[in-house]
């Protein structure tokens, strides 16, 4: 490798973090303990509950010991945490008993993201996270360094990478280098999108949190209902009785009121969690990259080079359909398939006016003319096939069983048209559009999801045919992308063949890096 | 130099017009051995259960016949799907078709292959077979598992893929 010598301003001897990082470690370790450690304590807890008298006293002692231990551990961890930025690499030494040394080379750094927990903000400190191409575990983060220093390291890294390019070492670095340039020149640019609190709250309403919460509570439903019947509803009734005249309807009103309250609480929690995540959401278009900042307790700054966006999905579920909003999701290479990897670099725009999304797609994929988008539906055979195989067949079997056991089966007839309606809705959403360089796939049910991607990003392609599809000159197509699969059923065979041939041609012809 | 000519879709190389090479003739037998062992275990367990648990003879008979039918179907499937299985190489990609009912054709361009693996199990070694696994980005595990290749073909395939992917990388540098 060619020797590169630059005087980097961030270059340094071994450094310590700001003492305030102790707070960060305390909070971080507590969260980790709650998430991972508590299950291991379950046996001890069981013994404690069954065997120990004087529970409060011992609980106090244990709690105090835990807090003191945590603080001491965090201080020791802080004192043993050293980092060094030099010679084109970041080196980390940490650990109290078992020492650990991590080295990350500048050229492996994909992104430098900054997170600012609220207790860091007044001190002008940030948590600097270096995103590497490798696995999530090997990631390096420096909690508690000054904002300026973080920016400095960031500039140095991208300068270094563009120098590599100048020496012809890494082709990909060219784009990185110019990204860094544009970052510097456009730092004060106005955000392309800024979300108000009301908009973020809307997203909270649409997310599935409410349903997840209800699902979690489901096993306890009976207990909850009994409890509310015994203690909550009578209370509401007595309160109501003071304002309203006595009536037998009072009980019903109380139950309804209580249910509404429960649902409202669930919705509130969902709205709150989306505010925590997306508070003060701002998206900047910086020429070759997007930058996003958001977060209530911890402000996260994420930037992503546009050429790393593998695909864009525009989603609208049924709630958003009513609220007339869409969610825009940027797909990226997913190396670790854990949930962490998914959420961490989430650039998504949680809520957006539907008329604005073509602009976003336009800004990401420059050479795509969004007005060309004109979806072709899939074969109507999809309807009859899916109804027959996935609806009528199982229903007939069920009917036979019900007749066998002399049960009432007539109501099954009523289900058939419902199923047909659902299948029809699904069929109506399916759509395919492509030109020489891009493809868009539309799926959905009541809402819809449109995914747009450049053909050269595709990793491999498949065609699937069953005897039925072959007879009717149809085929299913499957595209493998760096973030997952996209597929479309019941495409006319000629169209599928033309598309797959074009796709293969574009992938094989392209010398652009898909990453 | 940037150019942006229109592409005539009709004259692009057609993936449906390729000659596929069948898998090695020993491939079905390797699958048969695998299933044979599975069924031997299932039958042993069932016979022991029949002797120990006093299962009525007619129930045992039904279960036995049912299993026989499943076995017959699997044997048929192995040989029938063997006829449908094949690989083809083009200048820029590898094609693999498989499946009896869900007939799948997958095209993996050489410039999207991350790495490859060759694997040989106990029976594969005895029958002179090998499995080649092809990985591309974003797949949960390997994207393409091509089993039932003769050892010679597997190593040829491996060499071709390595050559092609290397030359791609050189072009990019």
Image (cartoon, coloured by chain):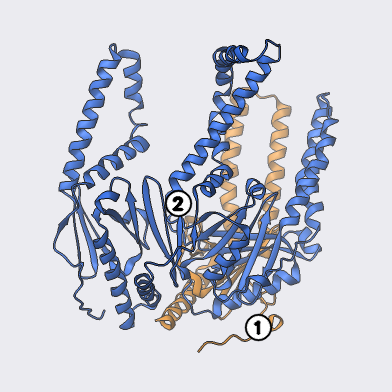
Chain colours: A blue, B orange
Closer to us: A202 or A413 = A202
Closer to us: A87 or B37 = A87
Splitting the image into 4 quarters, where does residue A234 fall?
A: top right
Secondary structure under badge 2? helix
Crowd around label 1: few <14 · some 14–19 · many ≥20 (10 Å): some
Q: Position of residue A436 (x, y in %)?
A: 63, 77
Q: Which residue is mark 1?
A: B7
Closer to us: B139 or A366 = A366
Q: Quadrant of the C terminus of chain A?
A: bottom left
Q: Position of residue A309 (x, y in %)?
A: 49, 66
Q: Which mark is residue A343?
A: 2
Residue that appears at 32% across and 36% down? A33
C-alpha gap between disc 1 and disc 2: 38 Å
Splitting the image into 4 quarters, where does residue A36 fall?
A: top left
Q: Chain of mark 2?
A: A
Q: Position of residue A354 (x, y in %)?
A: 62, 58
Q: Chain of mark 1?
A: B
Q: Position of residue A159 (x, y in %)?
A: 29, 74
Secondary structure under badge 1? loop
């Amino acid at each position: 490798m060619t020797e590169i010598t630059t005087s980097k301003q961030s270059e340094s001897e071994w450094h310590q973090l700001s003492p305030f990082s102790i707070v960060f470690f305390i909070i971080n370790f507590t969260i980790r303990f709650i998430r991972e450690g508590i299950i291991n304590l379950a046996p001890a807890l069981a013994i404690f509950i069954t065997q120990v008298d004087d529970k409060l006293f011992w609980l106090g002692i244990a709690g105090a010991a835990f807090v003191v231990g945590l603080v001491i551990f965090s201080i020791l961890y802080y004192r043993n945490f050293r980092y060094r930025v030099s010679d084109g690499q970041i080196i980390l030494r940490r650990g109290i008993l078992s020492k650990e040394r991590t080295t990350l080379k500048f050229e492996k750094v994909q992104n430098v993201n900054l997170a600012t927990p609220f207790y860091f903000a007044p001190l002008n400190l940030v948590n600097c996270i270096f995103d590497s191409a490798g696995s999530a575990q090997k990631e390096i983060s420096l909690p508690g360094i000054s904002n300026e220093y973080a920016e400095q390291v960031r500039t140095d890294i991208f300068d270094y990478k563009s120098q590599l390019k100048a020496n012809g070492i890494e082709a990909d670095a060219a784009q990185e280098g110019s990204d860094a340039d544009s970052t510097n020149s456009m730092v004060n640019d106005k955000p392309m999108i800024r979300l108000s609190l009301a908009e973020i709250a809307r997203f909270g309403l649409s997310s599935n949190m409410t349903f997840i919460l209800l699902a979690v509570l489901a096993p306890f439903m009976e207990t909850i209902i009994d409890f509310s019947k015994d203690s909550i509803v009578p209370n509401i009734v007595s309160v109501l009785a003071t304002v309203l005249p006595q009536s037998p309807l009072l009980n019903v009103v109380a139950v309804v009121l209580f249910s509404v309250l429960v649902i409202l609480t669930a919705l509130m929690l969902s709205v709150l969690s989306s505010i925590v995540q997306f508070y003060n959401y701002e998206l900047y278009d910086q020429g070759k990259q997007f930058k996003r900042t958001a977060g209530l307790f911890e402000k996260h700054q994420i930037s992503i080079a546009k050429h790393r966006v593998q695909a864009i999905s525009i989603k609208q579920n049924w709630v958003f359909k009513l609220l007339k909003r869409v969610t825009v999701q940027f797909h990226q290479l997913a190396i670790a398939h854990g949930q962490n990897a998914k959420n961490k670099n989430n650039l998504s725009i949680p809520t957006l006016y539907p008329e604005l999304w073509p602009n976003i797609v336009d800004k990401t994929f420059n050479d795509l003319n969004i007005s060309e988008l004109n979806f072709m539906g899939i074969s109507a055979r999809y309807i009859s096939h899916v109804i027959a195989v996935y609806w009528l067949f199982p229903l007939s079997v069920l009917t036979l069983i019900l007749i066998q056991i002399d049960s009432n089966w007539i109501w099954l007839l009523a289900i058939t048209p419902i199923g047909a309606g659902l299948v029809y809705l699904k069929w109506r959403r399916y759509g395919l559009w492509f030109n020489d360089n891009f493809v868009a796939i539309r799926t959905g049910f009541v809402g819809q999801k449109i995914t747009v991607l450049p053909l050269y990003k595709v990793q491999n392609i498949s065609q699937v045919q069953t005897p039925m599809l072959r007879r009717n000159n149809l085929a299913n197509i499957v595209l493998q992308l760096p973030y997952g699969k996209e597929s479309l059923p019941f495409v006319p065979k000629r169209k599928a063949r033309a598309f797959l041939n074009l796709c293969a041609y574009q992938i094989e012809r392209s010398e652009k890096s898909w990453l | 130099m940037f150019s942006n000519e229109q592409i005539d879709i009709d004259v692009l190389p057609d993936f449906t017009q390729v000659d596929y090479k069948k898998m090695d003739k020993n491939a079905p037998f390797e699958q048969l051995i695998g299933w044979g062992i599975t069924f031997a275990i299932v039958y042993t367990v069932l016979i022991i259960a029949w002797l120990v648990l006093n299962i009525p003879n007619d129930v045992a008979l039904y279960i036995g016949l049912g299993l026989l039918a499943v076995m017959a179907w699997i044997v048929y499937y192995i040989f029938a799907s063997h006829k449908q299985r094949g690989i083809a190489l083009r200048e820029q990609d590898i094609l693999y078709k498989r499946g009896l009912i869900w007939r799948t054709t997958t095209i993996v361009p050489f410039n999207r292959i991350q790495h490859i693996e060759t694997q040989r199990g106990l029976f594969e070694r005895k029958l002179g077979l090998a499995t080649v696994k092809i990985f591309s980005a974003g797949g949960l595990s390997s994207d393409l598992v091509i089993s039932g290749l003769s050892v010679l073909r597997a190593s040829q395939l491996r060499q071709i893929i390595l050559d092609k992917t290397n030359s791609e990388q050189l072009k990019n540098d």
